[in-house]
Amino acid sequence: MSQEADLTLARNWFDRQGWKPFPFQEQTWKTYMKGRNGLLNAPTGSGKTFALWFPIVLEYIRNNPDYKSNHIKGLKAIWITPLKALSLEIRQSAERVNEDLGTQLTVGIRTGDTSTSERAKQKKNIPDLLITTPESLHLMLGTKGYKKVFASCQAVIVDEWHELLGTKRGVQMELGLSRLKGICTGIKIWGISATIGNLDQARQVLLGPESDAYHNSILIRANLKKKITVRSILPKVMETFPWYGHLGLHLLDSVIPIIQNSKTTLLFTNTRSQCEIWFQKLLEKYPELAGEIAMHHGSINKETRIWVEQAIRNESLRAVVCTSSLDLGVDFAPVETVIQIGGPKGVARFFQRAGRSGHRPGEESVIYFLPTHALELVEASALQKSVKRKSVEDRVPYMNSFDVLIQYLTTLAISDGFFPDEIFQEVKNTFCYQAMTKDEWHWILNFLVMGSQSLRSYDEYKKVEVDEAGRFVVTNRGIAMRHRFQIGTIVGDANITVRYKKGGYIGTIEESFIAKLMPGDIFTFAGRNLEFIQMRDMQALVQKSTKRTSKVPAWMGGRLTLSTQMSKLLREELYTASLDEKEQSIEIRALKPLFDKQFRESIVPTTEEFLIETFETSEGFHHVFYPFEGRFVHEALGSLIGYRISLLQPISFSLAFNDYGFELLSDNPIDMQQVLDNDLFTTDFLMEDLQKSINATEMARRKFRDIAVISGMVFTGYPKKGIKMKHLQSNSQLLFNVFRDYERENLLFQQSFRETFEHQLEEGRLRIAMERISNMTPKWQACSQPTPLSFPIITDRLSRERLSSEKLKDRIRKMAVKLAR
Amino acid sequence: MVKHIQLRGQTFTLHSSGVLYWKSRDMLLISDVHLGKITHFRKYGSAVPLNAIHGNFRILNAAVEKFNPKTICFLGDLFHSYKNKEWEFFESWVINTGVSCLLVSGNHDILPESLFEKLEMEVWPELVIDDFLLTHHPTERTPYFNISGHIHPAVRLKGPARQSMRLPCFFRSGEQLIMPAFGEFTGSHTLLPTPKDEVYAITPEEVIQVH
């Protein structure tokens, strides 16, 4: 059969729907049918599922012309999705094609939600197309006889690859693919990604940097032209608009006309707590909206979320307040308008959200930007520019993540076992581990078998064993079982289930929030006021309450940093404050009253100036620096400068930072002239100084948490069974201290520092930022009171880091014990 | 390194390693050592650094050398879990130290008493000596002064310019003194003192009364 004949089936199917295939769809079909791999750059709602599902079916038909009467059993393709929620939609698309073409191909879903009986069925009779997550794929690799199951597989499609890239789930995916390449002959690997800055690299990571698979691959861009319009919601009176805050409730009234003039509106918030508060306040102030608006975030139970998603499709809701939980996948054609509350912090994210509206090809996307405090209007203006320039961020892939590798090798050891020489080649060909040395590999093997690098007679360590054939296996059932529960790389605070006392699941909340509650406390969750009654077996029992409350669960991980692109745009915008009005955007013009106040006390820096402000309040002496480089760089820079100052005089700081700058707060003033004279912003000895600053250790300690769980050193407990394994409970903080005191050379301990420097402190960005600053003229302003620019920073009470060069005894003398209420 | 306090007219010495020395009885009190915890974790596949095992004994030796007591009384949670190789280290430590040892047993102490008998160690659910009631769990019982462990107390300090830190401590509340946990690889729990309580924070070098 010729290639054209192959494609006729697909074209006819499109014809029957009254559609015409996009050029990118045809190109993908043809490339796939030639046996090549690739990365498809296409947005949600563009028909990407059909772009890759069709060639899988067509290839099956080509190899099995009697497909209508003769169904060849066995796995044909794996479709990986980062979100369980997306699997239903993918299945619907796939089944629709199967039915229409009469292929008899079956589609199955396997995720953490799949029941045991369903899984057993799949084991007996594997579906032709399996839709699954990276974690579930690894669970399958941890099952005896997995090679036989996967052997017939012809294709792996990794959907939303941009979401996985730049995370450890991405690394997990790389490892999974490396194994599939080894056991499935002729397998084709395809990724689907939204637009990111490093698409070429994304393809390399997916396929392996110098692999045959990579050389036999192609990048296909959908190139669907989409018009995005950004509109800022400006406060009517700038003078009373707050200088700080992150909720944005001052502009609550302004969203009402927008909601009313549009079929369906999505309101994106940055955190789950902000989402809760907005939903609550909207209903409080506009009770007539009851039944017409809903809320959607990752902690709400699945049924409710699915109901909300369905209601959006049915057009039975006017508006949904949501978080990034609605960023991905699901195609919501009826959404006409999107409102972004607070800075989205990244251009790619902003585009993606904007793209949720006007989903039909050719339609315009409209996104409103609602600032939560005055300075965010600068961000709004910067976003306008970013839309024009179409500059999007990179997703930086992880390198040498030994924790994920240790988990993966243990997974292989609990199923059929592995031979190191065979697996080393596969692992070495991945992007993540391309630079791994033989020494490091041996270290890891020793770690798995001995839990250390040398054998000692009194040691009782037990995990992986080496059998007579030289195969690495786990024979202990308890170890295998615990490992299965731990497969995955998303580590959060332990999650507590919230339930009504009388029964009824509401959702999950992080343990750290529940730990702060006393019985009788009222809090807001899932849009309801709940009274906390008690904890029982990892469940928080609650009942409804009519009392009002200000307590809203604060979820971790809600804090994002500005990307390099956004930081640059933001600086450029801010510098226009001193320009003529005609050259300013409407947002900057609206900020005039604020800038006037700023100029009265201090300045708004220009391109050439680096602003430093100092002033005293009842809290102490504030020293505020403004690099405008995003919070991660500021955290590093603040830590570094704080450390260097502490060398000049014994002093203690608390450090605060946001996307605009950082503050060093102390009970003594810093001699700022001395700081400027001593060239403290030099990049000389940058890494040495950073490592010595206490902060780097504290950050590494936090990174170590994930590493300890992923590598299996901390056991998080069996789900739903509560704490049954009490003697095995420990926390990663303790473990970190023991490593610091006794085994610093441990690769996992060192990884926590490496990740701190590469991913948290963003060493590369930091260096560039410091070089930029060293070419600027420092402008030190001694002010009599806090300035508008400083306000959002000095009022940040959450993320304070501490740094000191005073003697412990001297510090303690100045302190008082925190007393019981 | 040390801080002397008076309890019921008797002198007690608080040491920065977390031990308490009772002068008139020539007795060293040590709480929550959790020996065997590291090996227990390793046995279950968690690779806690092996060298930390010896750390516990190093600090024990230093404390014994400093006070040279007649008796050592462990206030519970001496051994973390089931018997493992660390028990053998403890056995030889007891024999080499030559100090008679007692155990007031805690919730973690599930080892059979015969093991302690072999070492001539007495095991008690609680002990009354003079005016003092020694227990693992904090216990209020008139007319005694209670010395206990179990809680692993720590205290949070706050200072000017939003400074803050957390330190393990000896915690005195009325007729009770709760001792800090001694062992490596043990955590702590922050207590909020009332105005009447006394708190002695321990740092690597010192014992400092902070409240």
Image (cartoon, rainbow, N blue to C red):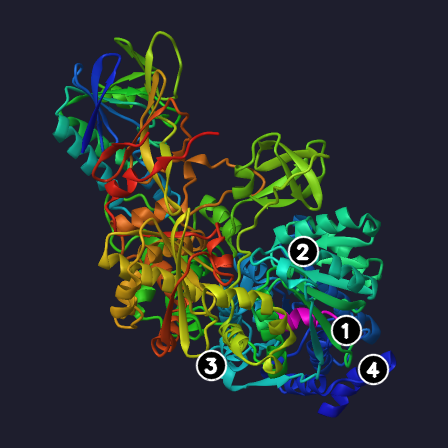
Which element carries disc 2, helix, strand or loop?
helix
Within-10-Å neighbours for mark 2: few <14, some 14–19, many 20+: some
Which element carries disc 1, helix, strand or loop?
loop
Within-10-Å neighbours for mark 1: few <14, some 14–19, many 20+: many
Task: Decide which of tag 1 and tag 3 comes sooner along the chain.
Answer: 3
- Provide the residue designation for mark 4: A19
The Cα–Cα distance between marks 2 and 3, rounded to whole angstroms, is: 55 Å
Amino acid identity at mark 2: His
Q: Is residue A313 magenta?
A: no
Residue range of the region highlighted in magenta in the rendering: A349-357
| Circles 4 and 2 on the same subunit | yes
The Cα–Cα distance between marks 4 and 2, rounded to whole angstroms, is: 46 Å
| Circles 2 and 1 on the same subunit | yes
**Residues under numbered marks 4 and 2 in contact, where contact means CB atoms less than 8 Å apart:** no
Q: Please give the chain letter of the residue carrying mark 3.
A: A
Left or right side of A169 for A542: right
Task: Decide which of tag 4 and tag 3 comes sooner along the chain.
Answer: 4
